[in-house]
Protein backbone atom coordinates (compact mmCIF):
# COMPACT_ATOMS: atom_id res chain seq x y z
CA UNK A 1 0.00 0.00 0.00
CA UNK A 2 1.25 3.48 -0.86
CA UNK A 3 1.98 5.70 2.14
CA UNK A 4 -0.90 8.04 2.95
CA UNK A 5 -3.55 5.81 1.34
CA UNK A 6 -5.97 3.32 2.91
CA UNK A 7 -7.97 0.60 1.13
CA UNK A 8 -11.74 1.09 1.10
CA UNK A 9 -14.49 -1.27 -0.05
CA UNK A 10 -17.38 0.17 -2.07
CA UNK A 11 -20.56 -1.45 -3.37
CA UNK A 12 -20.26 -3.06 -6.79
CA UNK A 13 -23.00 -0.86 -8.26
CA UNK A 14 -21.08 2.31 -7.32
CA UNK A 15 -17.84 0.85 -8.67
CA UNK A 16 -19.50 -0.09 -11.97
CA UNK A 17 -21.06 3.36 -12.46
CA UNK A 18 -17.81 5.13 -11.53
CA UNK A 19 -15.79 2.90 -13.85
CA UNK A 20 -18.16 3.49 -16.76
CA UNK A 21 -18.12 7.27 -16.23
CA UNK A 22 -14.34 7.33 -15.85
CA UNK A 23 -13.83 5.32 -19.05
CA UNK A 24 -16.22 7.56 -21.00
CA UNK A 25 -14.62 10.80 -19.76
CA UNK A 26 -11.02 9.73 -19.09
CA UNK A 27 -9.35 12.39 -21.27
CA UNK A 28 -11.47 15.24 -19.91
CA UNK A 29 -10.94 14.16 -16.29
CA UNK A 30 -7.19 13.97 -16.83
CA UNK A 31 -6.90 17.36 -18.54
CA UNK A 32 -9.40 19.31 -16.46
CA UNK A 33 -8.91 17.80 -12.99
CA UNK A 34 -5.64 15.85 -13.12
CA UNK A 35 -7.42 12.55 -12.49
CA UNK A 36 -5.20 9.74 -13.78
CA UNK A 37 -6.96 6.57 -12.60
CA UNK A 38 -10.28 5.11 -11.53
CA UNK A 39 -9.12 5.21 -7.91
CA UNK A 40 -8.14 8.84 -8.36
CA UNK A 41 -11.56 9.58 -9.85
CA UNK A 42 -13.39 8.00 -6.90
CA UNK A 43 -11.16 9.92 -4.45
CA UNK A 44 -11.83 13.13 -6.39
CA UNK A 45 -15.60 12.54 -6.21
CA UNK A 46 -15.50 11.95 -2.46
CA UNK A 47 -13.30 15.01 -1.88
CA UNK A 48 -15.54 17.28 -3.98
CA UNK A 49 -18.70 16.02 -2.26
CA UNK A 50 -17.19 16.65 1.16
CA UNK A 51 -16.11 20.15 0.12
CA UNK A 52 -19.62 20.87 -1.10
CA UNK A 53 -21.07 19.69 2.23
CA UNK A 54 -18.52 21.68 4.26
CA UNK A 55 -16.97 18.58 5.78
CA UNK A 56 -13.50 19.53 4.57
Image (cartoon, rainbow, N blue to C red):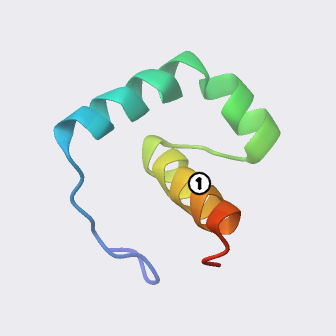
The residue labelled by disc 1 is 44
Residue 40 coordinates in the image, percent (x, y): 52, 52
Residue 1 coordinates in the image, percent (x, y): 31, 74
Q: Is residue 25 above or below residue 36?
A: above
- Residue at horizontal 59 percent and vertical 57 percent from the top: 49
The quadrant holding residue 9 is: bottom left
Q: Is residue 41 above or below residue 25?
A: below
Residue 19 coordinates in the image, percent (x, y): 39, 30
- Residue at horizontal 40 percent and vertical 75 percent from the top: 2
- Residue at horizontal 41 percent and vertical 76 percent from the top: 5
In the displayed image of the protein, which residue is found farthest to the bottom?
3
The residue nearer to you, when weighing 51 against 38, is 51
In the displayed image of the protein, which residue is found farthest to the top?
24
- The answer to whether residue 28 is left or right of residue 18 is right
The residue nearer to you, when weighing 52 against 31, is 52
- Residue at horizontal 46 percent and vertical 83 percent from the top: 4
Q: Is residue 33 above or below residue 19?
A: below
Which quadrant holds the C terminus? bottom right
Residue 34 coordinates in the image, percent (x, y): 72, 47
Q: Residues within 10 Å of mark 1 (few under 14, many from 20)?
A: some
In the displayed image of the protein, which residue is found farthest to the front?
53
- The answer to whether residue 43 is left or right of residue 9 is right
Amino acid sequence: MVEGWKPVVIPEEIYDVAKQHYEEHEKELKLKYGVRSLTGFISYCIREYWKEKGII
